[in-house]
Amino acid sequence: MRRQVRELTSSWLSAGRYVPRSDCWLRSFDLEFSRELAARGLIGITWPVEFGGRGLDARSRLVVTEELLRAGAPVAAHWISDRQIGPAILRHGSHELQKELLPGIISAEYIFCLGMSEPEAGSDLAAVRTTAKRVDGGWSVTGRKVWTSNAHRATHAYLLARTDSTGRKHEGLSEFIVDMATPGIEVSPITDMSGEHHFNEVSFTDVFIPENRLLGTEGNGWRQVIEQLSFERGGPERVLSTYPLLVEALDHLRRTSDGSHDVELGALVARLATLRRQCWEIADALDAGRAPVVEAASLKYLGTEFENDVIEFARRVGLTTARNDPLAEALLAAPGFTIRGGASDVLLSIVTKSETRQ
């Protein structure tokens, strides 16, 4: 599989069909590339053969995702679906929902966005004000979600909504799968500081969701979403988002170095090896049927620091920051590193509480 990915990315690079980018899993959207991966059986590879997957282990998927990130490939079209929505449907979805949705994800026909964060909620995922009220045949949803990557291109959305407001804020939450073509959904673009549009605000006004699109158990959304976040936080994209920039810095050093940056480079390489080992251990946990919530939080926290340090290293070795060059692109992406997937203080809290309980 490693060879398959390298051959595909090399052929696309040779043909000039994409340019390697930092943060490619969020910013580089190319549906044709995702569908070429799908044709090679490289999406949903851990999922059951019954739904079109290959029934392989999480370590096999890690090999594929590492190679795609190393190459800075345009993978944003399928990344969220493959990383966390499919696994969430496998864990909590009905068999009917699995049969309906998983083959479409595996073929890169279905594109998912995440309806989690809300305006004015900051990093408090439980501060959900979007409501889902029971109506005949399903639910009626009203509310807003923000920072919803690629919602303007998505066919479906994962949605976290409040189905009961009588308890504590972590209670009464439920998960849903929503067709983005449903009446009452409005997608408004959010342009980032680089001028790119991949973020959005999504408004739901009396949006009808059929009963069978409830994911898992009503009111169990908090436990389910925390599980799901271990998939989101525990992958190599939390380590390798700036890898294409590291490659640029190494190429620059080969041409210009007097050896003065060797110690700093060695420290970065050692940290990268440790973080890759953490990714491997998280994959082992997933293969064992666990949701490695604490391990994923630790990886995401340490990986964020590493990715930012790669940017600083590239700056110190003399890469320029002209518009659209690798360092400038990474710098513009960097403010999101410590927020997406959980702010750093939230991740430290998860790890600390775990240590306290032991």
Image (cartoon, rainbow, N blue to C red):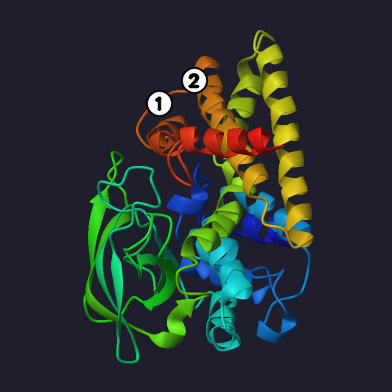
x then y, percent, for residue 317: 55, 16
Left or right: residue 331 versus residue 71 is left
Residue 79 visible in rendering: no
Q: Residue at x 69, y 77 (%)?
A: 53
Amino acid type, residue under disc 2 in the picture: Arg
* Residue 136, image quadrant: bottom left
If you read the primary sequence from the N terminus, does the residue marked by circle 2 or circle 1 appear first?
Answer: 2
x then y, percent, for residue 341: 48, 47
Q: Nearer the viewer, residue 35 or 211?
A: 211
Which corner quadrant holds the C terminus?
Answer: top right
Amino acid type, residue under disc 1 in the picture: Thr
Q: Is residue 74 above or below residue 334?
A: below
Q: Is residue 271 above or below residue 1?
A: above
Which corner quadrant holds the N terminus?
Answer: bottom right
Do residues under tags 2 and 1 come within 8 Å of each other at their CB atoms?
yes
Figure label count: 2
Left or right: residue 271 versus residue 228 is right
Q: Nearer the viewer, residue 327 or 223?
A: 223
Residue 43 visible in rendering: yes
Q: Nearer the viewer, residue 317 or 334?
A: 334
Residue linked to disc 1: 321
How packed mark 1 is, by other alpha carbons closer than 10 Å (few <14, some 14-19, many 20 or more), is some
Label 2 to label 1: alpha-carbon separation: 8 Å
The local secondary structure at tag 1 comes to: loop
Q: Residue at x 55, y 54 (%)?
A: 229
The local secondary structure at tag 2 comes to: helix
Q: Residue at x 73, y 82 (%)?
A: 49
Residue linked to disc 2: 315
x then y, percent, for residue 296: 63, 45
x then y, percent, for residue 344: 49, 34
